[in-house]
Image (cartoon, coloured by chain):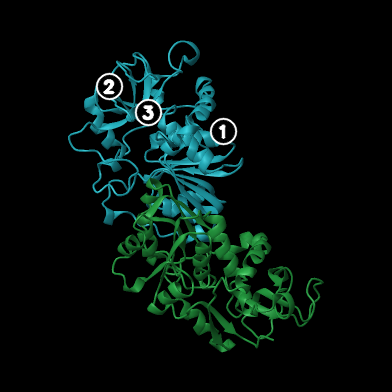
Chain colours: A cyan, B green
Amino acid sequence: MRPKMSRPLRESYTAAFVPGDTITGYGVARVVDSSDPRLAPGDLVWGITGWEDYSVVTPPATRLLSKISHHGVGEGAGVPLSYYTGILGMPGLTAYVGFHEICAPKKGETVFVSAASGAVGQLVGQFARLAGCHVVGSAGSREKVELLKTRFGFHDAFNYKEEPDLGAALKRCFPDGIDIYFENVGGAMLDAVLLNMRVHGRIAVCGLISQYNLADGEKDAVRNLAAVISKRLRLQGFIEPDHKHLYPQYEAWVLPYIRDGTLAYVEDVAEGLESAPKALIGLFHGRNVGKQLVRVADDE
Amino acid sequence: MRPKMSRPLRESYTAAFVPGDTITGYGVARVVDSSDPRLAPGDLVWGITGWEDYSVVTPPATRLLSKISHHGVGEGAGVPLSYYTGILGMPGLTAYVGFHEICAPKKGETVFVSAASGAVGQLVGQFARLAGCHVVGSAGSREKVELLKTRFGFHDAFNYKEEPDLGAALKRCFPDGIDIYFENVGGAMLDAVLLNMRVHGRIAVCGLISQYNLADGEKDAVRNLAAVISKRLRLQGFIEPDHKHLYPQYEAWVLPYIRDGTLAYVEDVAEGLESAPKALIGLFHGRNVGKQLVRVADDE
């Protein structure tokens, strides 16, 4: 959402917000009325909705709404509706694609995740552990670091704000180097990681949150790209919409892990539509713990 | 060779030079005596030799010497021995692997090559044209730019030293963007290229010659990495030694193109061992036109 607020929007894959129009983002909603044969009144959907109580979604945007079939009574019991904005929605598929498809992890490899307690990071860490990797995360508070180690199964974690030398912190956590870096922040962290990667390492470039609020001329310098050659690294940018076709595969894979409690998932819920701007701004200060949500209406 | 002269050598894939020892590099030589059953006196070889008239090569370094079978009378007639330091040697395989294996070009795609008149660049440009791509190169003098357009078949070329705005130069040459960038220089050029890449573009990171003479703290800043996400770019570093097994395939593919004149190849020959240091230094000032060689002895 943040890049959609920048003008000129030269580096985004999505259209800019138009001042005066409704702000949109990923949400969960119930269909009130529909002329789309795919969607009936009462259906629950997830996808792009508005920051508003009721949204009018017209074709072709309706194809960005996916029907929710695993909620409520019956087979899907126990899966909160809000999960479709996170672990069962865009962030979940992002973590799955970025880690499993882009990084092609092998058992025993070392994995580093930045912004590791966020919506995507907390999942990547757990997916990495499930894949038999040694996984370490960074976050911006002691509370988050504890969460990484106690809830999300990271083997180790550090608070980047308390590390005077990020390279030394990485060296301490990865004495033999990093095979896979799941990049959510950019800037100084990326520069430090480059020097600590192992030969043939892979970097999934998912987000650069440290950079989004900087003007073009202020973006942090990355100076250690020579490591890309000497270590034969691959940096791969990706976005979830390119990989929508993998959602059914992902959902089938992840649902059992959610239901049997193998995967933990932490949300940070802001109450009421009026709290949405503050919640969004809070992301850039690391105020959220886990996936940031805004509750606009009751679940049922 | 340049990174091997830096201390500490933390970012190189090869051992540092030891002061007092012979400087080594890729060369062509004739075997005078040998206890290796693979090599007999009189054989011609290419690979890692010394900056000296006679080299003693001991195992395991002997495995870095490849026998030359396509030179002289008979089947290989017309292939100069020096080509085994270039188009038929490490730079040739580098260009082949970097372009065909790393970039996976498709007919009709757009390709940009920096340092395009150098040992590798001049080959990448011609390989790209053979693959049906639209290819543009940059170089550092008018003479080189002419060479790109008249000898190496680049569709267009520019002198980066005469362009006040590299981004504008790229926009002029690639109004619809760049699918493939073959990176030889780094720094400001990479930053400008990132903003001109197309969605799903690929960047083969082969060299960063603009950076090798800078101290760690002086390396040029790359600030436009956000494009890696928005355009879903892949940056892949590579070195030729990882791909040695492809040499027979490459040699078989490239030899007919050399023999029938499809491929042009330009060398810049410095005479005598005593000119070697100056020739190496000249690379960093762009003094060479084409592959820089040092002739230590007569061909035959």
Checking the image for residue A130, the label placed there is: 1
Q: Earlier in the sequence, mark 1 or mark 2?
A: 1
Q: Is residue A213 left or right of residue A105?
A: left
Q: Determine whether label 3 and label 2 are within 8 Å by CB.
A: no
Q: How many marks?
A: 3
Label 2 Cα crowd, 10 Å radius (few <14 / some 14-19 / many 20+): many
Residue A89: x percent and y percent? 42, 28
- In the picture as drawn, the residue positioned furthest to the front comes out as B260
Structural distance between the alpha carbons of marks 3 and 1:
33 Å
Using the rendered image of the protein, determine whether residue A38 is visible from the camera's viewpoint: yes
Disc 3: which residue: A63
Q: Chain of mark 3?
A: A
| Badge 1 element | helix
The quarter holding residue B89 reads bottom right
Callout in the foreground (3, 1) = 3
Residue at point 44% right, 34% down?
A146
Disc 2: which residue: A296
Task: Tell me the kind of residue under disc 3.
Answer: Arg
Q: Earlier in the sequence, mark 3 or mark 2?
A: 3
Task: Tell me the kind of residue under disc 1.
Answer: Leu
Task: Tell me the kind of residue under disc 2.
Answer: Val
Residue B276: x percent and y percent? 55, 84
| Badge 3 element | helix
Residue at point 67% right, 65% down?
B252
**Quadrant housing the N terminus of chain B:** bottom right
The quarter holding residue B172 reads bottom left
Q: Chain of mark 2?
A: A
Label 1 Cα crowd, 10 Å radius (few <14 / some 14-19 / many 20+): some
Foreground of the two, B153 or A145: B153
Structural distance between the alpha carbons of marks 3 and 2:
23 Å
Q: Determine whether label 3 and label 1 are within 8 Å by CB.
A: no
